[in-house]
Amino acid sequence: MTKIKLCGLSRLCDIETVNELRPAYIGFVFAQKSRRYVPPEQAAALKKALSPEIRAVGVFVNEKIEQIAALFKAGTIDLAQLHGGEDEAYIGRLRACTDKPIIKAFGIDSEADIRRAQESTADFVLLDSGSGGTGTVFDWKLLAKMNRPYFLAGGLDASTVAEAVERWKPYAVDVSSGIETDGKKDSEKMRRFVETVRRVKV
């Protein structure tokens, strides 16, 4: 079954909802320019309230490796998602500091972007539209070229995710803006998204 990641959580009520819904992953955004940014202390408090079976992903954009390593060491995050211009050398340096899984995000506009994702040494790749967080869909036909497990993001919500899961069978689906109302996580949209994914027969 396709796994689910609910990203951009920032409030205790968000955590209470995901503890009921039991997605495989949730995401804390540590990119300060993002409207979903949470400071490390806030994320640490939210992680303590999170069910232990749900893995917390830290989302970073060109962050200092020492900062990511510190969040791993503190137990605030279980995986790191790299959403900037981090290259293979950066991934290698991060691996030298931690044995935790790494997700590298790729904006998909062409087959060349798919090839770059295929060649990444990250544990997982995430395929998104543009620079990510745009809430728009890229050309899913490009997914036919993918032959490694991937997180699918970009423009997903309860009305689009069933087709994505049924047709492309991604390892996981990742949603943020598609489960929001007025810029805040909406518990009912979160619930509909999760239930929709779990109803799909693959």
Image (tube, rainbow, N blue to C red):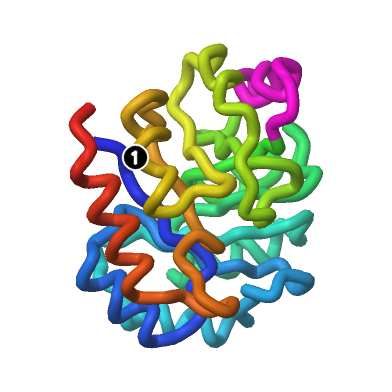
Tell me where the magenta segment starts and ends, as one range: 108-120
The foreground one among 95 and 181 is 181
Which SS does the magenta portion mostly show?
helix
> Could you tell me which quadrant the C terminus lies in?
top left
Residue 45 included in the magenta stretch of the image: no
Q: Is residue 190 left or right of residue 142?
A: left
At 28% from the left and 65% from the top, the residue drawn is 191
Q: Is residue 188 left or right of residue 120?
A: left
Q: Callout 1: 10 Å neighbours few (<14), some, many (20+)? A: many
At 75% from the left and 47% from the top, the residue drawn is 131
At 50% from the left and 34% from the top, the residue drawn is 123
**Label 1: which secondary element:** helix
Above or below, comparing residue 135 to residue 182 in the picture: above
Pointer 1: what residue? 162
Q: Is residue 96 left or right of residue 87?
A: left
Percent of width and height locating residue 50: 31, 75
Percent of width and height locating residue 137: 61, 41
> Could you tell me which quadrant the N terminus lies in?
top left
Above or below, comparing residue 6 to residue 114 in the picture: below
Give the amino acid type for the residue marked by disc 1 in the picture. Ala
The foreground one among 46 and 199 is 199
Above or below, comparing residue 135 to residue 150 in the picture: below
Dividing the picture into quadrants, the one containing residue 163 is top left
Dividing the picture into quadrants, the one containing residue 138 is top right
Percent of width and height locating residue 146: 53, 17
The foreground one among 25 and 64 is 25
Q: How many marks?
A: 1
At 32% from the left and 82% from the top, the residue drawn is 49
